[in-house]
């Protein structure tokens, strides 16, 4: 399929799995289409918010709890038009793409087997299974460590073998901050880079004046 030669190249967004100890990138999940909308919420972590203490109304307990929400579309229609070049899509549709995303919220079979083996051996305490560190990437200006908190899939079309060929995936991604990691965790450094980049961008915003607000002085 050809494209208009002057069409600008648009970057895609996605999720990168990181080894928390080495900070090396593992699997890179690139969303097929960049979502049309990305919503964000920031829940302020103020001292007075929980306790009702009015003596310190301007103090923060930590960074806000930030959550991204998006809907990703996965569609194999174009690939199925060229079956010889897209054998995976012909054989199993978009099952691989869905499985890669579901791996974000599912422990591996090896982890489940290891936990079961410890239980069989009579282990008194079994540590919860840990997932790789996920980075949500939406341009070079927005790279944040996240945890998937909501995941839903609507499969909208299927081939004759009932392999899904089109689906919409809704994700909620909670940004993990130093409050979640602890300052010594490798993920904390990734969050601090994200925070410092926000601060640098804020400095580039054009500052207003009191005159624009109709105020002569404070």
Image (cartoon, helix red, strand yellow):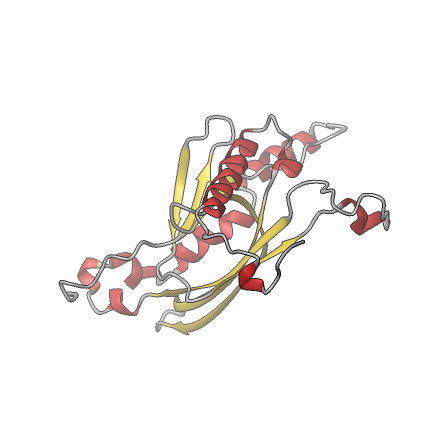
Taking depth in this image into account, of 179 and 96 the one nearest to the observer is 179
Give percent across and percent down for residue 10. 29, 57
Identify the residue shown where x is 73% and y is 27%.
123
Is 57 on the left-hand or right-hand side of 14? right
Q: Is residue 78 above or below residue 64?
A: below
Q: Is residue 170 left or right of residue 139?
A: right
- The vertical placement of 118 against 163, above or below, is above
The answer to which of 63 and 57 lies nearer the viewer is 57
- Residue 93 located left or right of residue 147: left
Q: Which of the two residues, 37 or 45, is positioned nearer the viewer here?
A: 45
Locate residue 102, reporting x and y percent. Answer: 50, 53
Residue furthest to the front in view is: 216
- The residue shown at (39%, 53%) is 13
Residue 112 drawn above or below residue 29: above
Instruction: Give residue 188's position: percent from left, percent from top.
Output: 57, 33
Q: Quadrant of residue 76?
A: bottom left
Which residue is at a point 64% across and 43% down the rendered structure image?
A: 63
Point out the image quarter for the N terminus.
bottom left
């Amino acid at each position: 399929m050809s494209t208009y030669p002057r069409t600008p190249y648009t970057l895609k967004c996605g999720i990168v799995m990181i080894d928390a100890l080495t900070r090396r990138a593992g699997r890179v999940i690139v969303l097929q289409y960049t979502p049309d909308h990305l919503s964000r919420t920031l829940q302020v972590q103020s001292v007075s918010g929980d306790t009702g203490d009015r003596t310190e109304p301007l103090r923060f307990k930590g960074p806000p709890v930030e959550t991204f929400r998006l809907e990703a579309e996965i569609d194999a229609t174009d690939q199925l038009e060229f079956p010889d070049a897209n054998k995976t899509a012909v054989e199993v549709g978009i099952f691989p793409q869905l499985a890669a995303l579901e791996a974000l919220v599912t422990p591996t079979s090896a982890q489940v087997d290891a936990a079961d083996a410890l239980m069989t051996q009579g282990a008194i305490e079994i540590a919860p299974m840990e997932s790789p560190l996920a980075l949500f990437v939406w341009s070079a200006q927005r790279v944040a460590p996240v945890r998937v908190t909501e995941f839903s899939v609507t499969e909208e079309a299927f081939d004759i073998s009932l392999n899904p060929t089109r689906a919409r995936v809704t994700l909620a991604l909670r940004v993990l901050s130093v409050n979640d990691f602890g300052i010594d965790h490798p993920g904390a450094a990734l969050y601090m880079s994200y925070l410092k980049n926000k601060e640098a961008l804020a400095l580039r915003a054009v500052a207003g004046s009191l005159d624009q607000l109709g105020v002569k002085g404070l």
